[in-house]
Amino acid sequence: MTVPRFAGVVPPIVTPLTAERTVDAASLERLVEHLLSAGVDGVFALGSSGETVFLSDDQRDRALEVIVKTVGGAVPVLAGCIEPSTQRVIDRTAAAVRLGVEAVVTTAPFYAIVGPHEIERHFRAIAAAVPVPVFAYDIPVCVHTKLSVELLTRLAADGVLAGVKDSSGDDVAFRQLCLAVQDADFSLLTGHEVVVDAMMLAGASGSVPGLANVDPAGYVRLHQACVAGDWETARREQDRLTRLFRIVDAADPATSAGATRGVGAFKTALTMLGIIESNAVSLPLRPLDEQEAVRVRTQLDHAGLL
């Protein structure tokens, strides 16, 4: 199997904010250093965990500027360019490339109703306009379109896409894609953080787990065990991380949906670990309160992180 250029553990880094909701550069620098010291293989900026759709262009640019500068070329930086239409994505990728990223990640168009032909033209137009590799972000829960195995295989074969960041939850389709592109230089990155071991066994190149903000070393150990074929060690590490993932259950479900639960829990955990200053999040999300934070602390303790 070909080992693609973009592989391994690539955390989708959160964007620390101040109480006034400006980018907290000092906290972001510490977070990048936290990830690098754990041995991650890349950083994915401005993804779902990075609150990209809630940030202004100025906030996005500032976050990318800090991340690229702090990484200093140690690992590749991928940037989410999540916009509803083709030209808006192209405009956003121009800013990301100017700031020094090595690849961009984008979804199918959203809001407007489009079909498979429009989606294919979307990705081909972006790739033709962008001087760096392009990743497809398969996240139908947000954009209401599932990227088909046939489309991704065709775009991989034509060199349009360098890889896929799979957050579809469709493990059958992901495994079929692994089989379809197994001889290609194509990155298969799973965002399904509680079954990374299974996805690696199926043929994934690596993972993009939001929980790796909190425990990057755990995901690095997991990845290394998978690459070595030590599946028993991988299973034990994955089981520990799966239990730690219960921090996303800390938020009150009556007042919190997915983004608040995930990003809110990750940021709350990072404040407890002394890595970022505040668990502030973008509107309309809300930060976890003190009672919810106690539940996060319990899971951090059980995972051996405190």
Image (spheres, helix red, strand yellow):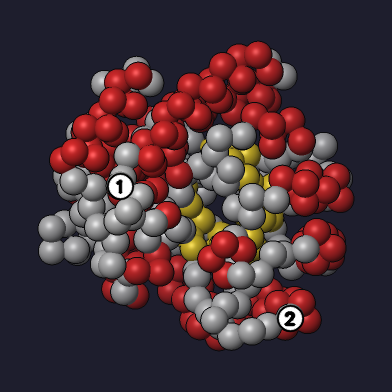
Residue 136 sits in quarter:
bottom right
Query: Of the residues shown, which amino acid type is indicated by label 1?
Result: Asp
Mark 2 or mark 1, which has the lower sequence index?
2
What is the x, y in percent for residue 277? 16, 44
Q: Looking at the picture, does residue 4 appear above or below residue 157?
A: above
Q: Position of residue 134 (x, y in %)?
A: 63, 64
Tell me: 208 left or right of 58.
Answer: right
Counting the numbered discs, the total is 2
Residue 137 tag number: none
Q: Please tell me which residue is depicted at 71% across the width and 77% down the height of the picture.
A: 119
Foreground mark, 2 or 1? 1
3D distance between C-alphas at marks 2 and 1: 37 Å
- Which residue is denoted by mark 2 in the rendering? 115
Q: Which residue is mark 1?
A: 252
Using the rendered image of the protein, determine whether residue 97 is visible from the camera's viewpoint: no
| Observer-nearest of 22 and 141 | 141
Position of residue 233 relative to residue 52, above or below, is above
108 left or right of 158? left
Determine the secondary structure under disc 1.
Answer: loop
- Decide: is 14 above or below 205: below
Q: Residue at x 53, y 66 (%)?
A: 142
Which quadrant is the N terminus positioned in?
Answer: top right
Q: Is residue 215 visible?
A: yes
User: Within 10 Å of the Cα at label 2, are there few (<14), some (14-19), or many (20+) other Cα atoms?
Assistant: few
Circle 1 residues within 10 Å: few <14, some 14–19, many ≥20 = some
For this orientation, the residue located farthest to the left is: 19
Residue at image point 13% right, 58% down: 19
Quarter of the image where the C terminus is located: top left
Q: Position of residue 9 (x, y in %)?
A: 54, 38
State which quadrant residue 222 falls in.
Answer: top right
Q: What's the amino acid at mark 2? A: Gly
